[in-house]
Image (cartoon, coloured by chain):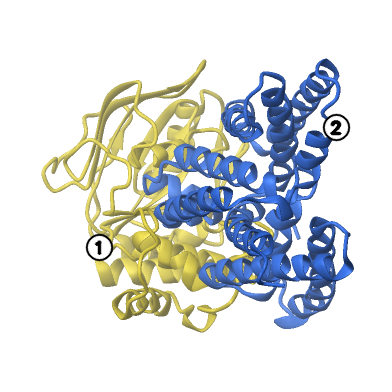
Chain colours: A blue, B yellow
């Protein structure tokens, strides 16, 4: 199987986006921003549709729309309650635009399908190179933001007192997510990108405590899901890769979730401090 | 202990002069850690404080009292450089307050836990050391030792690897205090550390804070709703209400005349069993 270039390309790009997806997903989960992880791919889809309409490569449309949406989310949703509403409103608007673009340019159902569900088995060497370089850039950026991001995520009041630029860090994270989503849509498709953003990280968080361990584990899981998905798709003959990736992610998450839940509730038998949401 | 014992134990220590809201900023402008001179704080339409002046000396334990909305937390934010005074001058360690001053340790009012999964106590305490710096950082023995020393000082070393969201209220306060101590601050700002704690835990936290400030010589601003558990330990009281403030010894501040003046309506202070109860206003 590994002899075929298209399989190699699929595994290479897939591994790259699995890594960035897992890393950014960890922070999305930690900050309660999973809805943004769902909204941004949909917004990306609208961007891709718009790009095709004006005759430009879809990926550019995705970058523009998702990065603009990141700033929009930051501007509109300053507190948690407002945020989900703002994200939802932005997403609905974007989907509406996407529908408009589809309507205006009849006859590219094939491309729409590709954007929605990904074309991992149709990736070129050139695409792999671009994805690889972008992945390195995203990872470097996350490493740069690492400590202030963790601090403002898990201890926001003290972080502010210590001079961490929380707003800047939050915006930077969303832009990183936008870039990650845009890269990943080509591989996984807009509809199923969420799986790679949230699945590995959610599983890792239930199994590890230290952020470095959680990040490493989610990246490894993501890569494993991609390899598993590609292998199963090839073995099955014609079934889509992203279906297998999503199914594997779910199949791993479910038992981990159910088994670890019991463990943490009874672990210390202590009463949590009042005012905690559990 | 009764009122006489409390008073004599305090005068056995230093007894600073009373400073009212209309007085000057007291003596010792050079040796003072914090000095406010005719500071006014306005947030939007509301005037939080009209004209506030006081100084804080090294090693003092000062309780900050007053009703909700009086500006106690706002005062702490002012000292942290997070908000600017509308009028007047604030000096912290002889200079205007700046954000991220490592000589100030801060324990905020509500728990640190914002996420439904949590890092270990030692990870969160560690933020106090270098969480504000860019880059991923590198684990080091010095860093681990500093974190464990701070945890040991607050009696929480055994909790180092516990997820922070499994801590009880009292344990969480210890975590926040340990975090605040990591930079060896000269000033500790504690925002309502006793809220949500039962009497026994509250006593433990107070005794811990007193022990720390004696051992390290840090000054402490201790925001609280109930001054009584602190009476045996504190040096002065800063009472904020109705856009005015008073600072001085507890019996000089918490009495019928001064509080009625500050509120502009009748306030009675009842003393029973060595404790002070303020009657007539919401505290």
Vertical placement of residue B216 versus A270, above or below: above
The residue that label 2 is drawn on is A109
Image quadrant containing the C terminus of chain A: bottom right
Q: Is residue A116 left or right of residue B177?
A: right
Q: Is residue A181 left or right of residue B262?
A: right
Query: What residue is rendered at 75% in x and 47% in y?
Result: A118
Vertical placement of residue A191 versus B137, above or below: above
Residue B34, image x, y percentages: 25, 43
Pointer 1: residues within 10 angstroms few (<14), some, or many (20+)?
few
Vertical placement of residue A97 versus A81, above or below: above
Residue B74 visible, this orientation? yes
Residue A86 visible, this orientation? no
Query: What residue is rendered at 88% in x and 59% in y?
Result: A239
Q: Nearer the viewer, residue A121 or A176?
A: A121
Q: Nearer the viewer, residue A235 or B95?
A: A235
CB atoms at circles 1 and 2 under 8 Å apart? no
Residue A167, image x, y percentages: 48, 37
**C-alpha span from label 1 to label 2:** 83 Å
Q: Nearer the viewer, residue A31 or B231?
A: A31
The residue that label 1 is drawn on is B13
């Amino acid at each position: 199987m590994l002899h075929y270039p298209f399989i190699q390309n699929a595994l290479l790009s897939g591994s790259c986006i699995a890594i960035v997806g897992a890393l950014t997903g960890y922070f999305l989960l930690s900050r309660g921003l999973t809805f943004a992880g769902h909204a941004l791919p949909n917004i990306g889809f609208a961007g891709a549709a718009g790009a095709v309409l004006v005759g430009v490569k879809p990926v550019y449309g995705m970058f523009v729309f998702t990065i603009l949406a990141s700033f929009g989310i930051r501007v509109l949703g300053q507190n948690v309650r407002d945020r989900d509403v703002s994200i939802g409103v932005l997403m609905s608007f974007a989907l509406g635009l996407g529908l408009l673009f589809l309507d205006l340019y009849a006859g590219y159902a094939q491309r729409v399908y590709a954007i929605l569900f990904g074309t991992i088995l149709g990736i070129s060497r050139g695409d792999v190179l671009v994805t690889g370089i972008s992945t390195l850039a995203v990872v470097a950026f996350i490493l740069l933001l690492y400590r202030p991001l963790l601090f403002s995520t898990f201890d926001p009041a003290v972080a502010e007192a210590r001079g961490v630029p929380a707003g800047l860090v939050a915006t930077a994270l969303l832009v990183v997510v936008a870039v990650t989503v845009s890269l990943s849509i080509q591989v996984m498709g807009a509809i199923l990108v969420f799986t790679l953003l949230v699945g590995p990280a959610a599983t890792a968080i239930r199994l590890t405590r230290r952020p470095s361990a959680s990040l490493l584990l989610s990246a490894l899981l993501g890569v494993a899901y991609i390899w598993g998905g590609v292998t199963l798709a090839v073995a099955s003959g014609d079934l889509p890769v992203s279906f297998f990736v999503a199914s594997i992610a779910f199949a791993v998450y479910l038992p981990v979730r159910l088994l670890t839940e019991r463990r943490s509730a009874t672990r210390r038998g202590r009463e949590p401090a009042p005012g905690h949401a559990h | 202990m009764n009122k006489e014992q409390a008073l004599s134990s305090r005068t056995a220590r230093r007894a600073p002069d009373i400073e009212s809201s209309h007085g000057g900023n007291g003596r010792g402008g050079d040796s003072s850690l914090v000095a406010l001179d005719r500071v006014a704080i306005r947030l939007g339409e509301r005037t939080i404080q009209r004209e506030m002046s006081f100084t804080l000396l090294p090693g003092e334990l000062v309780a900050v009292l007053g009703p909700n909305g009086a500006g106690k937390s706002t005062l702490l934010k002012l000292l942290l450089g997070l908000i600017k005074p509308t009028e007047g001058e604030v000096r912290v360690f002889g200079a205007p307050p700046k954000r991220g001053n490592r000589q100030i340790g801060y324990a905020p009012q509500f728990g640190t836990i914002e996420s439904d999964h949590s890092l270990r106590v030692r990870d969160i305490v560690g933020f106090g050391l270098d969480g504000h710096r860019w880059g991923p950082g590198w684990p080091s023995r010095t860093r681990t030792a500093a974190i464990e020393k701070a945890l040991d000082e607050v009696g929480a070393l055994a909790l180092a690897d516990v997820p922070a969201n499994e801590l009880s209220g009292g344990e969480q306060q210890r975590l926040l205090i340990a975090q605040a101590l990591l930079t060896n601050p000269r000033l500790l700002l504690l925002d309502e550390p006793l809220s949500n704690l039962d009497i026994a835990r509250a006593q433990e936290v107070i005794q811990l804070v007193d022990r720390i400030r004696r051992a390290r010589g840090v000054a402490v601003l201790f925001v609280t709703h109930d001054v009584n558990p602190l009476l045996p330990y504190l040096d002065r009281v800063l009472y904020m209400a109705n856009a005015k403030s008073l600072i001085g010894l507890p019996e000089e501040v918490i009495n019928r005349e001064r509080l009625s003046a500050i509120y502009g309506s009748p306030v009675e202070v009842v003393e029973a069993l060595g404790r002070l109860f303020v009657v007539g206003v919401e505290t």
